[in-house]
Amino acid sequence: MTNSGSVAAVDLGATSGRVIVGHVDRDGVRTEHLARFPNGPVALHEHGRDALHWDVVELYRQVVAGLGRARAAHPDLASIGIDSWAVDYGLLREGRLLGLPSHYRDVRHEQGVPRVRARLSPAELYARNGLQHLPFNTVFQLAADPDAHLADRALLVPDLLGAWLTGVEAAERTNASTTGLLSATTRDWDPTLVAATGLPADLLAPLRDPGDRLGTLLPSLGGDVPVTLVGSHDTASAVVAVPATDPDVAYISSGTWSLVGVELDAPVLTDAARDANCTNEGGVDSRVRFLKNVSGLWLLSESVRTWERGGETIDLEALLAAAADVTTPVPVFDVGDDAFAAPGDMPARITAWCAARGRAAPASRAEFVRSILESLAAAYATTLQTIIDVTGKDVRAVHVVGGGSQNRLLCQLTADRTGLPVLAGPVEATALGNVLVQARSLGLAGLRGASLEALRHVVARTVEPVRYTPAPGSDARSHRTTVRSHA
């Protein structure tokens, strides 16, 4: 048994990537940032329009450089694990990348929806894959991809990077569950779902589980360090690190997107779940992440980018403080409206949304920020109530993890609107979950064979969440009648 050790977590988000070294011992887990680099859509003019892509080759270059720094700082590095956002993929033919992966916000994907639904109805799709309908789910992307028929392999982003690092092609199961091509019940590729794309079944790589050893770094990259599969969908890793010691909790993985959900032992494939557009995604140890995708801090980030285009630098902390002091009513808008999906001038879109409905738009930047955060919190409350209604699960508290856990105003508004205590943190939940799955696989700190609950206790010993209690008289809407509160 190994008492302690260090592993590297490659954590790729929609706006940035990091290489983080995690140190695990009997006292807990701590992280050390070795590299951080930007990520984002690249617009390329194709077929008369600007198409959005990911520069995955640059991401790979940054990952290799970051891992080089990690190995230089920690020559005894025991393992590497990779997680990223979901659904997007690279197409390969004889191991060669055919082009930059398409970005999930590219509008082309919508063309795949009618093509798939011509073969399978929405009810049939849900009965098989259990997924929330999102037009960028991989099943629709592949059906709309004009180059897919040229490929002999499609690999999701973390699987693609893993193949480039080790030479081994595999599909990690938690991320595969977001594609719409995996059976919600058997957890294997569903031939009927794959056929709905019009593509051959062998386009998809063999499935592997978190904790499996993918391979070893190629000799050209230094060799000898194993690459361990983790919950390669970043939310799957983040949920591992929710520091919950009570099973009756919900979570919000808060970042560019907000994933609002609960953890279950089996999928819920009822008509009520489909009508509510809830999703059953795979978690580590065959758990089910029953959740809904809600827009996230993308709305705030795009607003800040708009304001900075004129050359001004925005002090986000000062802007959030000003938003907290806003006392005038602000509009609560539908954060899931398609008008807010693409990059661009978000304040102008919010103004237009309000004008179309005869509502007064925010009058200042502070009011825009307050409006965004109030709208997100309202969406969280509504979504959580839906999940409770569909599953019957008792929820006593909400854990917010990820970057949004640092947004004090959003956390307080979430507590106010749900009527539940909010426990915020850790910020680096995804990296911690990545690290802990590697540590368990390697047997570090006596974790071999440990349950998910035991891993969460390690996080709870390491990080003390910040608690937000619903304000007296706050509008908790219908939650007070359906959810027991510890407030």
Image (spheres, grey):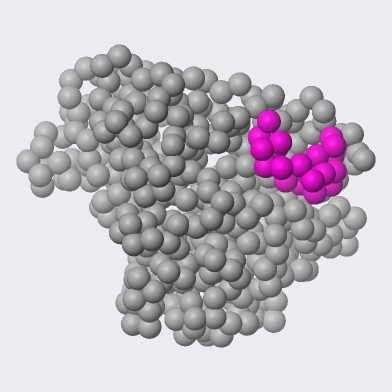
Instruction: Give coordinates of residue 202: x percent, y percent.
Output: 63, 82
Taking 19 as reference, is 164 above or below it? Answer: below
> What is the count of numbered marks?
0
Q: Nearer the viewer, residue 443 or 235?
A: 443
Residue at (26%, 16%) from the top-left corner? 473
Tell me if 158 is positioned left or right of 316 in this view.
right
Q: Residue furthest left?
A: 358
Residue 422 % position (x, y): 45, 26
Q: Quadrant of residue 408?
A: top left
In the figure, 156 relative to 222: above or below? below
Magenta span of residues: 437-457
Residue 350, percent across and down? 22, 42
Q: Position of residue 117 (x, y in %)?
A: 35, 77
Question: Any magenta on residue 449?
Answer: yes
Identified at 44% across, 37% down, the residue is 394
Residue 55 visible to an observer of this rendering: no
Left or right: residue 213 compared with residue 303: right
Residue nearest the viewer, comparing 55 with 384: 384
The residue at 29%/44% (across/down) is 335
The quadrant in which the N terminus is found is: top right
Residue 339 showing in the rendered view: yes
